[in-house]
Image (tube, rainbow, N blue to C red):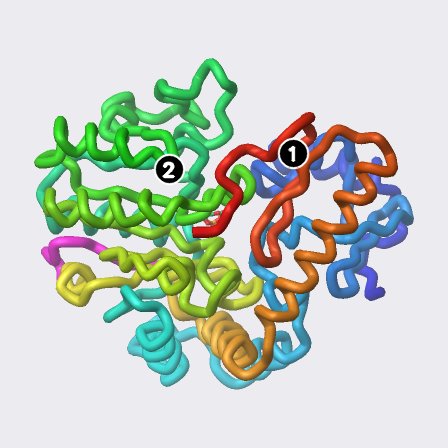
Amino acid sequence: MSSGPVGNESGARLAERARQVVPGGVNSGQRSVPGLTDLVVTGTDGARFRTADGREYTDFHSAFGPPLLGHNDPDVARATAEAGATLGHMGVGVTEGEVLLAEQLTELIPSIEKVLLTSTGSEATFHALRVSRAATGRRLVVKFQGCYHGWHDAVSLNVISAPEKVGGHDPISTGILPEVLEATLVLPFNDSEAVRRTFAEHGSDIAAVIVEPVPHNVGALLPYQEFLTTLREETTKAGSILIFDEVITGFRHDIGGWQKISGVTPDLTTLGKAIANGAPVGAIGGRADLMDLFSTRPGAPAFFAGTYNGHPSVVAAALATLRKLREEPVHEHVFRLGERVRTELTGLYERLGVPAVVTGYGSVFVSYFMPGEAPAPTRTC
Ligand code: PLP
């Protein structure tokens, strides 16, 4: 296992130094692990990592989802390093890699006719909402309880809500203008009737519906097929844009995303995480007429920019990842691993007398620590 330069410093000391100069001591809101204070990572080997206090852990959480091929896949790492050595980021024009990547994404993901790269998933969902408003001239967006679409204001509400907050507006941050929160309607996931009612009342004001086809941010609640078709029908009837946020589901369950599995094609798709197996990338793609509203020309309907978009090293990581996903039986392998983890965890909880239910889909597994059945629905569409 390779060690970082701080391998000899005690975890407690380094964590304290971090808290002096980094708010909360970590660089993302989700990185402090409850019950594990002073977690300082000093070395990694695949999915295993060592901490400054000499303990070893395995990252079953999979770094929030990107390393579908396994952490630090050697082929992706090699492609990234080679690109880094030969092709610096110039910030002008386009590279062959960007063209190849866009061509492959249009070929693989049913809804994508044109595509733009971002550096994160949040930027992709931000732009999806912006271009939906630009295209429709409308104000409202619809999201679903439990879905996470990134950190920006329009979607920063109703992710993991306390039971008494479900059904109302539950922002995950202060500092957001009330009128921004009010312009986002929150509906229960998998509730087709609520979708129909909302469209009957507000349809002509709804710019977009954004949904995680499987809200993995709260587990593995699988969508009813009928729910996804209702979203498609209602948005089409009302002239609203349907956005599938496939930042997690894209590539993880199928190389064509959940839209390929379900056969329901959205107008726009957002991607991230597994496209590049861990390199910082996101993408927004979809119908050509919508994507063409983004332009680099001043005065274009939807402004789109980003200093690092299409960075050659990241693009090389994505191309290497897609090559492997196409050429090797990655999904069969990770689905088998997921099944094995679910079976073994179920047995473990039974043996220990822990009241827990294990569920999931494909490579994703979730433990609900509760007696009885897993929250419905956990069946596939
Ligand atoms: N959308 C979904 C479904 C996500 O799970 C995430 C991140 O977890 C995002 C968007 C935001 O992506 P990022 O963290 O790359 O900004």
The answer to whether 117 appears left or right of 268 in the picture is right
Q: Is residue 103 above or below residue 223?
A: below
Marks 1 and 2 sit apart, C-alpha to C-alpha, by 19 Å
Left or right: residue 248 compared with residue 269: right
Which quadrant would residue 176 be assigned to in this image?
Answer: top left
Mark 1 or mark 2, earlier in chain: 2
- Give the magenta range: 297-306
**Mark 2: few, some, or many residues within 10 Å (few <14, many ≥20)?**
many
| Residue topped by disc 2 | 190
In the rendered image, which quarter contains the N terminus? bottom right
What amino acid is found at the position of numbered circle 1 in the picture?
Tyr
Residue 95 in view of the camera: yes
- Give the image location of residue 298, x and y in percent: 13, 59
Q: How far across and down, in percent of the image, does residue 284 sit?
A: 32, 60
Amino acid at circle 2: Asn
Q: Residue at x 78, y 36 (%)?
A: 38
Q: Give the residue displayed 67% in from the left and 41% down from the top.
A: 358
Q: Which residue is mark 1?
A: 368
Q: Please provide percent x and percent y for residue 23.
A: 60, 33
Please tell me how crowded label 1 is: few (under 14), some (14-19), or many (20+) other residues with Cα within 10 Å. some
Q: Is residue 353 left or right of residue 200?
A: right
